Image (cartoon, rainbow, N blue to C red):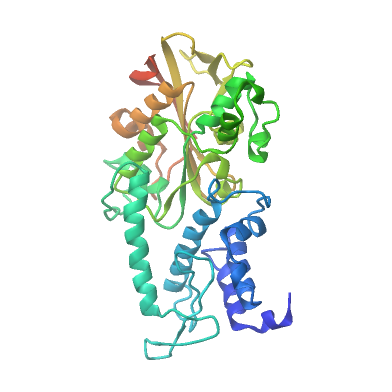
Amino acid sequence: MSGSREADPRWRLAQTVAAGPHFVRSPLLSRFLLYVVGETIDGRQASLTEHRIGVSVFGRPSSYRTDLDNIVRNYARQLRRRLHDHFANEGSGSRMRIEIPVGGYVPLFPEIAEGSGGERGVPGAGRSIRSRSRLSVAFRIAMAILVPGLLLGSVKLVQRNPRMGAGTEDPVREFWSAMLPRNSITYIVPSDAGFNLMEDMAQHTLPLASYIRGSYDNIPWNKLGPHAAQDLRTQQYTDLVSLQIVALLAHRPEYDPQRVLLRFPRDLRVDDLKHANAFIIGSASANPWASVGDNATNFHIELDAKMESAEIVNSHPKEGEQSSYASHWNEPAHETFALIQYLPNLNGSGHLLLVEGLDVAGTEAAADLLFHSDSISPILRSASHADGTFRQFEILVRATSIQSNAENAEILASRTR
């Protein structure tokens, strides 16, 4: 690193911000911030394109396409929000600010004139604090238009109630307040229907490690035309049940579109599950990230080696419970099962909510209970702490699948730790 960068007040400010509470637990966001600031100080701001950042910060190959992989745009939204939060809190006394205007990745460095509420220009500055306010309003308007459209509905945000603690009359509301906290990010991770089709073609499951690497070498692509094969490799396909779940979540009063981010499974990274909450939809056959909690749960899904059936394994059956619950996909009407699991994230700083069925009808049944049924309230109440947090819990759901539509969903068993 050049000595001129070390002596630059913009670099020292960026290092302070990156080490602060809004960034220290997200190495990727810190790296993103330091990269764009460093390149700007070194006079290479013209090179701060989405593609360059994807390669340099997020380790994407030089051949990656930004129209198919939106990781830089997703993280840029988080970066702008966390910069705003930093300078509204810990950094409120700083004479200089860091801003990254929407539409680009080149940072600006407005300086506040002491005691005047105004500002003075510094190298790299070109936007006033008053402009930042307008930008913030424009950003909120854009989010209000774009995000609800993506999530199939507009959302009216309301102030979250204070925590009511154990024994609350509304444990469901308390649970969503814990899952969608105001002070951190929650990712929604829908199922990857294209990946599910690839597994069906290969007639065997593909592990999470292969999914993260994008290793689909065993897929018989010769059964498809080159166009269809390329689409399955690169396009982001999901299912209607995932969209319905996202829409239901967007109508929760605790939902905030600036802190709840939609992340396609192929764009998710292990680091995301260390530093944020995540709502993972679908079983490992359609969303391999659903397998991250298997070692810490009593119930887990096992797929038939030839992808012809699946079952939920009950590791420690209680009296009256079975050791496994199977579903047979080749029958038009059949009994199906699903899981709702609330687990710690990978470093214990947040939580994972998994809604996964043996088939799409099972996932739909679990979502119906999660969003529409009072039967889940006693479980949530027993899992709640006095401070409004929740212990780890698992719920086993049974339903009838009729032409892939769920009927008569009910809770069979649960566990709370």
Question: What residue sits 63% from the left and 18% below the top?
Answer: 203
Q: Quadrant of residue 371?
A: top left
Count of numbered tags: 0
The one of 158 and 174 positioned closer to us in this rendering: 158
Examine the rendering and report whether any part of residue 138 can be seen.
yes
Residue 269 percent across, percent down from the top left: 59, 46
Q: Is residue 219 above or below residue 281?
A: above
Q: Is residue 198 above or below residue 279?
A: above
The one of 57 and 378 positioned closer to us in this rendering: 57
The one of 129 and 370 positioned closer to us in this rendering: 129
Question: What residue sits 59% from the left and 31% below the top?
Answer: 294
Examine the rendering and report whether any part of residue 19 can be seen.
no
Question: What residue sits 46% from the left and 69% below the top?
Answer: 101
Residue 350 percent across, percent down from the top left: 50, 48
State the quadrant of the N terminus: bottom right
Question: What residue sits 57% from the left and 38% below the top?
Answer: 234
Residue 408 percent across, percent down from the top left: 32, 17
Residue 188 percent across, percent down from the top left: 45, 43
